[in-house]
Amino acid sequence: MLKCFRKLRGSGRVLLFVFVASIIWVIVDIAVIRVSLGDVNNKLTKQRAFQKMKWAIENRQNMTKSNPPKTNPPKTNTPETNTPKTIEDAYEEEYMMTDREVSRFRVHRIKNKDNKDNVQDKKNLQENPGDDQPPPVASKVAVDLFIGDDDDPRLKNNLVKKHPKDVAIMKPVKNPPEDVEIIKPVKAPENTHVKGVAEHQAVKEELSMKEEKHIEKIQLQDTNQNTSMNEDKGAGEKVKKSETVQLNKGGVHQVLSLDVTAAPRDPNAVGQSGQPATVPSEEAALAEQMWDEGQFNVYLSEKIPLDRGIPDTRPEICAHSMVHDELPSTSVIFCFVDEVWSTLLRSVHSVLNRSPPHLLKEIILVDDFSQKDYLKDDLDKYMANFPKVQIIRLKERQGLIRARMVGAAAAKGDVLTFLDSHIECNVGWLEPLLERIYLDRMAVPCPVIEVISDQDMSYKLVDNFQRGIFNWPLVFAWNALSNDYVKKNNMTIADPIRCPVMAGGLFSIDKKYFYELGAYDPGLEVWGGENMEISFKIWMCGGKIEIIPCSRVGHIFRKHNPYTFPNDRRKTVERNLARVAEVWMDEYKDLFYGHGQLHLLDQKMMDLGNLTEQIKLRNRLECKSFKWYLDNVYPELDAPLLKAEGLIFNRGFRKCLSVQNQSFSFEPCDLAQPNQHFNYTWMMQIRQQDMCVAPLIAQTTIHLKPCDPTLSVLRWLHKSSKLKQPDQLTVENTSKLVCLEVNQQNKRLRLARCTKDNLFQQWEFTNYYIE
Ligand code: UD2
Ligand code: MN
């Protein structure tokens, strides 16, 4: 019995094992069946989704307020919403796409920062079987700036041919770009690579809200639409694609970081991604020869693709910042004289490629009477392919200032954006500028001006917190905000930076406001000083100038102007500055003249032209004083109105100079005596009220004469300062060195030959205001 029981127990284990095993088998079997059913379901789901997506694509272009979708979507099991969502939203929400599936509907994003990443992305793309079809949403169109077939060797080394006849403009893309990363688009004009759009949840919500409201939709058309110069008409067809973006009154969206590319961007192209380029040693002589044409490395510029990538140098948070949907449109104005072909074109392409098309009203090229042949017909022909670009030819050289005014007069945009003709606009450059004007029409925003190296054409990031200032005599300079200032004002690296003056070349301004301000002084010639004029005018007449760190534009800074000046360059700039000083600087103009510009006061030497209109304008606008400007906008500037003042003490005689009945005497020093009080001015005059100490050379003595800043005979050289020892008072305008001296015998004043260490020739004012 016991044995039998043991046997049964043994076989019971076996039975139990068999029982458990079959249960597991059944479970596994059911699971397998479920999985294959799921597969079938998934396929059906996907098919439905594709159908719906196809419908969405077909209808997307018809979706405007007045033009609702014409066809219905295919029926699905999911409830219909009134508002068609974006393709990818609809798909994602309703069918719970996997990441891999989502990636099919993503557009490509340019990754400027590191080509290695791009290569990796490409690899990922290849390894990812989900991406084996071209993305259905963003069909790519290339902007090919080279002639001929793919086999053309110039395509391979990205040689930009100078002769525009050799240049084909548009070319359809055959393969997806190579240097890309993939992100999810929400509002992207077709044919663009969009960075950072709607990755942000808040933006997504904002946008879907707007879609529901359907208040306004704007068609974002590719700027290159209908612009093919290519013989192949098909290429033209392919670029005629557009998408809609819905904009909402009072709504906001994440800043658009468009970057239309000549896809595929060749990572090995010369200067690609803003990398430094080098001249091969055998070409060094040629490169040197080409330098003078532009005063930078023209040789390399010719090799660099016209739509090269540049690194996105914005502070991290900029790509996520929000701007209003209803920004004003802008006309971009480039003035140029004898600009280098490749840099001019690169400038224009950077605007076309990186500006939201609906905000870019036009690009106006003002040719300031260039003499170079290629800037005539060839440029006309090339630009004829870009409907947004127009060229205005000046019949004689007007100079940059009047050329800008011609451009402004022709502009149809709400905002004028002035740019130099050798720049590269970075991604997302435009909206932050327009946003600033949208918020305050009297704000004049400038991008951060970054550096395109004149040597190797690399794109260089500049330091944060830089502002534009001037030093005497009105010399523009960059200046870093102090840490204290940054802390005190709680500033982040993306906050606008108040600038006492702008650099001049790159800024946006509300067009009406520009004219309210009287535009530029048309009496300014050729080049220089107009940045001071417009800066003072803006600040003193109620506006403000700011650098917007989220907007960045590279500029080739050159050591010499590559063009000629109709008259002497130095004189031209000095005269312009003197006009500005006369109109805007009140008594502070003395500081301008006093810092090495006294020769400008000589009317025979310098005809400043008529200033009446400018002075009238200032009065009409009821602009504030220059003192207000210094106190409120640029308090850091050292701007004492006098070089020195107080008593004039003679070190040898140990008494002070005094005026009694129009003649000079010496008295014991007494600060309370007004007749002992003199000012030593920036005009180098020794002044008591309106009377000036004047030398009488022939009589070797001095007398008092009514002051006149233009009279050079009234000028005394006196080198003493806060730091230096007392010094001689030397008559400035004589060939011999003549000094003011106390005659040791009769204790009277006289003019004598300057002798070192003679204490009777040494004078000291009570207060010095200069270092
Ligand atoms: C800076 C400004 C520039 C201007 C200048 C002072 C920047 C980046 N640049 O000098 O815009 O404010 O200071 O006036 O802030 N041009 C003409 N006609 C002429 C002379 C020049 O159209 O008679 C064009 C020229 O081709 C260029 C632009 O004006 O596109 C500015 O000239 P620049 O580049 O020689 O001036 P830049 O950058 O040294
Ligand atoms: Mn320039």
Image (tube, rainbow, N blue to C red):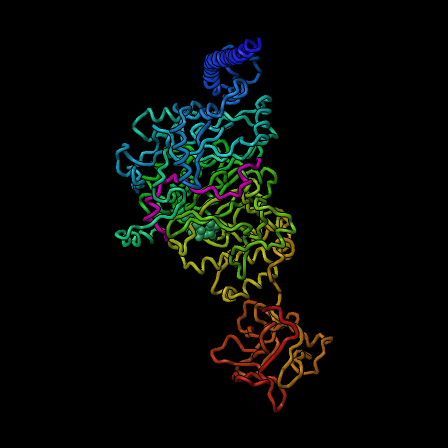
Image spot of residue 500 (x, y percent): 58, 53
As for residue 679 lying within the magenta part, the answer is no
Q: Is residue 76 visible?
A: no
Q: Is residue 222 visible?
A: yes
Q: Residue furthest bottom?
A: 745
Whether residue 54 is situated above or below residue 543 in the rendered picture: above
Whether residue 569 is situated above or below residue 253 in the rendered picture: below
Segment tinted magenta in the rendering: 294-322
As for residue 321 lying within the magenta part, the answer is yes
Q: Residue at x 61, y 84 (%)?
A: 749
Image spot of residue 309 (x, y percent): 41, 40
Hey, which quadrant is residue 730 in on the image? bottom right
Q: Is residue 254 left or right of residue 388?
A: right
The C terminus appears in which quarter of the rendering? bottom right
Image spot of residue 595 (x, y percent): 53, 65
The N terminus appears in which quarter of the rendering? top right
Q: Is residue 403 left or right of residue 739?
A: left
Q: How many marks?
A: 0
Hey, which quadrant is residue 584 in on the image? bottom right
Viewer-closest of 318 and 733: 318
Viewer-closest of 524 and 534: 534
Q: Residue furthest right?
A: 672
Image spot of residue 337 (x, y percent): 39, 48
Viewer-closest of 144 and 672: 144
Q: Is residue 503 left or right of residue 667?
A: left
